[in-house]
Image (tube, grey):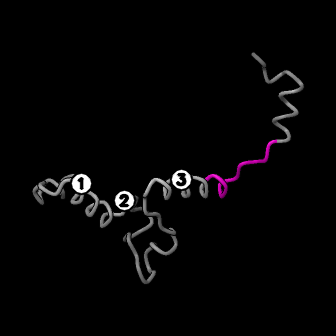
Amino acid sequence: MHSLSDKTDIHVLLRMPKTTEFTLESSVLDWLQALGYQTGFAPELAPGTPTPERESYQQVLLNQRLRAALLRINPQAPTTAIESAIV
């Protein structure tokens, strides 16, 4: 087993490309799309845009998407159960 104090390991680490937030986000979005998930560009979903999906930036969940997914997954569930899962 090698340790980080091993000069070879340190040189390998120094040659590795830096991972940025953009690189990580792009990789995760590509992965989720490959799995069949629908992704969106946050600024296009923001309040005050032509197609807002949230009322404010503090709203974390996209309620319309969540409601649609819950109905798709649980078609026999009563409306009250779906709504209580969202609140």
Q: Residue at x 51, y 69 (%)?
A: 41
Viewer-proximal residue among 49 and 7: 7
Residue 30 as seen in the image, left or right of residue 48: right
Q: Name the residue that disc number 1 marks.
A: 73
Please state which amino acid type lies under the numbered disc 3. Trp
Q: Residue at x 24, y 59 (%)?
A: 72
Q: Residue furthest top?
A: 1
Which label lies toward us, 3 or 2? 3
Q: Name the residue that disc number 3 marks.
A: 31
For residue 25, above or below residue 57: above
Callout 2: 10 Å neighbours few (<14), some, many (20+)? Answer: few
Callout 3: 10 Å neighbours few (<14), some, many (20+)? Answer: few
Please state which amino acid type lies under the numbered disc 1. Ile
- Cα separation between marks 3 and 2: 21 Å
Viewer-proximal residue among 23 and 56: 23
Q: Magenta span has 23?
A: yes
Could you say where residue 10 lies in the image, as x and y percent from the top left? 85, 30
Q: Quadrant of the N terminus?
A: top right
Q: Residue at x 11, y 57 (%)?
A: 80
Secondary structure of the residue carrying tag 1 is: helix
Which label lies toward us, 2 or 1? 1
Q: Name the residue that disc number 2 marks.
A: 61
